[in-house]
Image (cartoon, rainbow, N blue to C red):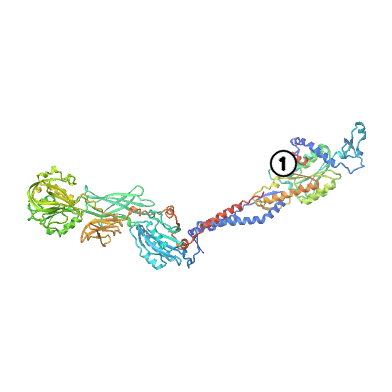
Amino acid sequence: MNISFLNPSLLWALPLALGPLVIHLLFRRKPKTIEFSDLHFIKLAAEKVRTRTRLRKYLLLLVRTLILFLLVLSFAKPYYNSMTSAGNKDKNDQLSAVLLIDVSYSSGYYEGAARRLDLFKEKAKKIIGLLPQGSRAGVIAYSSRVEAATPVLSGDRKYLAGIIDGIKLSNGATDIACALGPAKKLMDVIPSSNRALIILSDMAAHGFRSGPGQAGDKTRVVFFEPSGGENAWIENAAVEYDPAVKGFRIDTEAKASYKAAPPSLSASYYAGDKRIGSDFLNRSGAEAYKSSYFTGDIRGDVFTGKAAITPDRLEADDAFYFVKKKPGEFKVWIIDGDPKFGGVSSESFFLKNALPQAEVISESGIAGTDFSLPGAVVLANVAGDAPKIDEFIRSGGGALVFLGSHTSENFAPGYLPAQIGSKFSGAESVKWVAAGHPLAESVDAGAFEWDKVIVEQGFVLMPKENATVLASLSSGRAFLVEGEHNGSRVALCASTASRGWNNLPGRTLYAPFIGGLLRYLANADFTEERTAFTVGETFRKKAPEGCEVLAPGGAMLRTSYDGTDIYFSETGEPGIYRVMKGSREISEFAVNLDVKSGEGDLTPVSKRALRDYFSNCTLLEVPRAGWEKFFISLISGKDATRAALAVLFLLLILEILLSNPRPKS
Amino acid sequence: MKFLDPLTLAKLSTLKIHVRQVVEGLLSGLHTSPYKGHSLEFAQHREYSFGDELRHIDWKVFGRSDKFFVKQFQDETNLRAYVILDASGSMGFSSGKNAPKLEYASRLCAALSYLLLNQEDAVSLSAFDTSMKFFIPPHHQLSHLTLLLDKLETLTPGGETDISGVLGDFGRFIRKRGLMIFVSDLLSDQEKVLSALKYFRYRHNEVIAIQVLDPQEISFGYSGENTFLNLEGGNSIFADTDSMGDEYRKLFGSFLAGYKLAFRRAGIQYNLVTTDMQLETALERCLVK
């Protein structure tokens, strides 16, 4: 039989058990001297009880010594194990153990020079080596999901060690509940009354949120003494564009779990990979640190970067990535189907006046143009369709189509909100009819004097289903129709963009109307495309098929496509992801750790909370130092503390009886 | 007078009658005088009682009064009381709460002597330890009391006890039958003590044995481990009183019971008094049956 102790360091107190003997020998009270008349009867009585008295005295001494001995032993928590190195012959009593290894990002915490996960793996391999013959074990690596697991329990130690070696750190948060069900299933396959769950984790409280733990009745749950740790992490970095300063404001919030919280944390800010500034996050409340940092002018339409605090022992949560687009800025491309060498005759002349920022290209220039979002294209009297335009629209861009002399019978791209019919001629006025349309306020009918717009030539438009007629001619035919193509907005005008067929370009309403219409079509003011994701979330976006995603690590990964949107689930790494179509970047998004799960707080779970979590199980805490010696006794042995306490209780009763002999009547 | 202060004397006054009755009782037991034919001084008449010898009837008184009276002679009307006091070392014991046994016994002897002398009985006083310390022959004058009290007041505890040896020697002091009042703690060989006292009973003396003890000697109310030092001899013994107290009480109780039974069988009046008793209570116990 092997006897081991959970708290062997307390065994130093065993010599205290000799206390009663020492006191008896050294501190005997000097007896009083009393004069008495006759010693005869005293002598007789003393002789008669001498043997009994002596026996009682020595027995009392022995009992008191044993009481102290057992008291020290109980505090040392003894365990005895009747299993031999050959294991237990009773198969039903052979040990079935599952090692649960925490691979959440908090296991990347450095203890000295080694990460906790590496220490867990080393310990796991040692545990496998210590298991008695005949034992079977499994391994489950978990974060907020099972990251890796052995399919069955195995007695092959090499195999198990190999599994352990292959375990990698994940960027997920911790929730041990995800691993308990699979662990129980593994152990249930082979009936055994000798079951143990061995948890290799930092035992932080955040990992025991969803409980209680279903580990199976009478299962020993073994965990190592938690080491805790101090950590600071960025909880959030909210970026907003401030048009007043033409720059961005970064509101950073960090948290820390320190024994002695510092008054501030140092933070740095990056645009891309370039450091643009730093400041201090000042303490706000019990745990939070906050600061607002103003960048200067950031070139480009999108501000991509990160906020970072000084790296500590857990580096993963020291940075927070963001992607923020400058609102309101959108690009316009005017595709002039009939440039006529420029001048007032060109389709684009008036459009360019209305949209000075627009880029004018010819139809042949479509292929070489990078269309980006937010943006819109104006097709002015183009002859044919270009697949790139369709692609641009599908990816979220807006489009305004003007017809003209170059419009062919075959011009019927799918994104048009109406079918184009035959030409018409005859002066007709225009009336705005979409009273409830978002543009209605910005295109005030009265102020714009629509009735002064005269259309002399145009095409008959037959609005498709779900299209909206924004303005109509006096004949009732549609003049301006709006529709949706793959979620993007497309408007079709029955006449030209130039003054060839109508007087719209010459009206004062033309420039503001065209500007407002294009802003609307480009969705520039209403773009709320999500750019922030947490690790493990699926990224989704309206984009054409065939897009790829450039991950932070440099890998180019494929996306899935469901007909309208692309999907991407391999967001396992925090950082900036770039959605590419070929060599063209069409979008970016940021992925961060799930810091709101509380993973950064490494405060260990309390023993009480742990007992509540594993209410049907026997909890066994193993000290970190010197655990190998008694580990096996612990997981497959029996707790002798209660037996020791029971004997101690009986000895206490005996001591009381011996100390107070019953007086004889 | 240390042992017979006015208060004590006042208390004793009520006991005189008891003493008289005791004496008369004793005298009736001693009524058959072994000294026939001796010239005895006439002392007084007393009324005839059934059993009195007819030759002692005073016929002249009968002739005058038509009532029968017998003559009493000097020896018959006065008792000789021999008070023997144990003054050995053990009698010096006191538990602290009460007077030492010797002092108490001395007071008891003084009171008895006073009572007896007060009714013209002759009182002798002697004290002993390993041997007789002194012997004062009996006298019946009350003035004899002064001598007795002086002796008692100067008495101190002595050496070891040899009751049987002393009593054996004492026999030569008793020429005539009388009353022997033996005052001691009787902490000696029980058989020898009984044998010695029975001898006096055998010689037709009335014997009263008064055992004087301190309450602590009976109750043994000690606790813890103590070393007991013998007042006689100086030897000592270590004892754990918590563990042997019960046994001591049992043994000592048997010892006292043994005396009680043996004295009763021997026809010796036995009284146990403790030093916490009031003197008059002790005397009453001894004298009133």
Q: Residues within 10 Å of mark 1 (few under 14, many from 20)?
A: some
User: Above or below — where is A195 with respect to A417?
Assistant: below
- Dot 1: what SS? loop
Q: Position of residue B28 (x, y in %)?
A: 85, 40
- Residue at (80%, 38%) from the top-left corner? B19
In this view, the residue in front, A201 or A409, is A409
Q: Position of residue A623 (x, y in %)?
A: 45, 59
Q: Amino acid at mark 1?
A: Met
* Left or right: B119, with A402 as reference point: right
Instruction: Name the image quarter holding residue A651.
Output: bottom right
Q: Nearer the viewer, residue A416 or A125?
A: A416
Q: Can residue A496 be spotted in the picture?
A: no
Residue for badge 1: B277
- The reply to whether residue B273 is visible in this rendering is yes
Q: Position of residue A599 (x, y in %)?
A: 35, 54
Pointer 1 chain:
B
Left or right: B282, with A514 as reference point: right
Give the x, y percent position of residue B154. 76, 43
User: For this rendering, which residue is in front, A320 or B28?
Assistant: B28
